[in-house]
Image (tube, coloured by chain):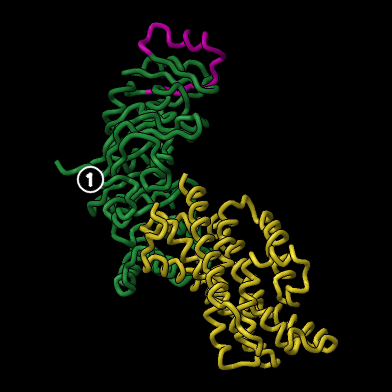
Chain colours: A green, B yellow
Amino acid sequence: MSQAVVSAKSLRKTFGHRDVVCGINFDIRPGICFGILGPNGAGKTTLIRMLMGLSPVTSGDYHLFGSDVSDTSIHSRVGVVPQQDNLDPDFSVRLNLKVYAGYFGIDSKTAESRIEELLEFAALSSRGDDQVATLSGGMRRRLMVARALINDPDLVVLDEPSTGLDPQARHLIWQRLRSLKAAGKTLILTTHYMEEAAELCDELMVLDHGNILTRGSLRELISEHVEPEVVAIRGLHNELDAIELCEGLDIRRDHVGDTWFCYAIDARPLVARCAERPELTFIHRPSSLEDLFLKLTGRDMREEA
Amino acid sequence: MILFHLAPTRVLAVWRRNFLVWKQLAGASMLGNFGDPFLYLLGLGYGLGAYIGDMGGIPYMAYLASGILCSSAMNTATFESLYSAFTRMNQQGTWESMLATPVRVQEIIAGEQIWAATKSLISGTAIFLVAGLLGGIQQWETALLALPVIFLIGLAFSGPALAICAISPSYDFFLYYFTLAVTPMFLFCGVFYPIDTLPNPVQLIAQLLPLTHAVALIRPLLTEMPLTLPWLHVGVLALYAAGGFTLATRLASRRLIR
């Protein structure tokens, strides 16, 4: 087996007296898309910042390509798409890439041919000479992905790559990321979107309050932790009402806000009962990462931690 | 962190980024750079100069021109390293984007400092020419030596300003630096009159400030006044440049890497 791209042993990060990452262990195999999932404040961004040497490790080992993360020369093999837009607003699209290539010490001839390829890749060829300020949110994010690829990295790290984008822009980004994976690059992405993790990730790690709740492939995680079907019901008056509705059926219930989630191996009998009560609105669907998260933490993924 | 572990290509890349931004707006930027000093020279040099006549044994225009050259180098480097650098550090995330590459904090600070000194040199050259036209330069043989000195003055003022930038919570904070450091230097370090007219304790403080040494170097190079202890002045400026760099790097690391 080839060497892990990233490995963490007893990795801990403390801000003041608060543990943000609580002594966790994981490693990331080359060539996969590894998803770090969790609500805001779970420790995702801190993991990424430590990986890039932007935040000192409090204790434990954190290795990138076999070197300690404090060795920043390793950055020549990594591309980063940060959460916050930090493109250069004073430059054109092309000049953004050109200047960034300079930080890696890439000579201008190599950079120029690379830039044309990347503009093509990011579907920005026709916008090369436009100022960054004139681009849409989706285009800017694609430019950030292109910028992260200027050094032809082996690993691309993306911190919430599709946050704040509309669905079309998001699908275009996902499609580009899949093609990167097909080209053999390792991807690490943090997200709090279940859909994004499901679309892209071969392996997932679910974090909450700096601890790993579980990890594995999407299919493994769901089959291991949650029943295959779920009925999400609104319109029930109270817990008693919910108990009554599910009486005699093999059902596990969770409750978030005004919605009851009822998990079952076969949910059809429950669906039939719901259909008899016109005041209820309900959806019957296969269970997803969202449900997994709810089960593991007792909270909705979208809630603030 | 090894402070002086600096890869020249990466320092240059940081410098080049700023240069390319400047190039796009060079016209407007130049106008601002030498507009102010030009007005000072005209207004005070001619206006006040007519009453004063000579100062320190040379015409007041020549006396003032060398002082203004120094204070404009100070202002240019200070502005660039406070306001512009703060925008790159805080608002635009430019420094953070650099840190995702092999570029290190000390290389960012070095690139910024050399860039600020470059801007001092650009605006200084413009004022140098204006001063020449207005009769502010008496000794053309040694006057050209003033240009590398202006670059050094830029480094000396940029370093401390970058350190202030690195601890500043907002743009408003810079006003303290101007009121407590820049303006007093402008008024008490020999730009407009010889410092030996000041009370002794004030003179002593003035001797510790970089602008005093900048003026003490530049004025003799441009005029017929004698040059004394040149290496002392160079040394003080170099000390401010290196000390500012060290402090700014440490403070910026603390801010960016946490």
Residue B144 locus on image (x, y percent): 55, 88
In front here: B158 or B90? B158
The chain letter for the residue carrying disc 1 is A
In the foreground, B70 or A31: B70
Whether residue A111 appears in this view of the structure is yes
Q: Is residue B53 above or below residue A252?
A: below
Q: Identify residue type, mark 1.
A: Pro
Quadrant of residue B173 within the rendered picture: bottom right
Looking at the picture, does residue A223 appear above or below residue A136?
above
Q: Position of residue A12 (x, y in %)?
A: 38, 33
- For mark 1, what is the residue? A30
Residue B124: percent from left, percent from top: 60, 80
Q: Is residue A160 visible?
A: no
A161 displayed left or right of A200: right
Residue B6 sits in which quadrant? bottom left
Outermost left residue: A1
Image position of B157 (left or right of B108): right
The mark total stands at: 1
What residue sits 32% from the left and 18% below the top?
A266
Residue sitting at the far top: A248
**Closest to the observer: B66 or B16?**
B66
Residues packed near mark 1 inside 10 Å, few (<14), some (14 to 19) or many (20 plus) = many
Which picture quadrant has residue A143? bottom left
Please provide the residue range marked out in magenta: A230-251
Check residue A259 for magenta coloring: no
Which residue appears at 44% of the width and 66% of the height? B14
The residue located at (62%, 50%) in the rendering is: B169
Look at the image and say whether residue A231 sits in the magenta stretch. Answer: yes
On screen, residue B214 versus residue B41, left or right, reads left
Q: Is residue A26 above or below residue A247?
A: below
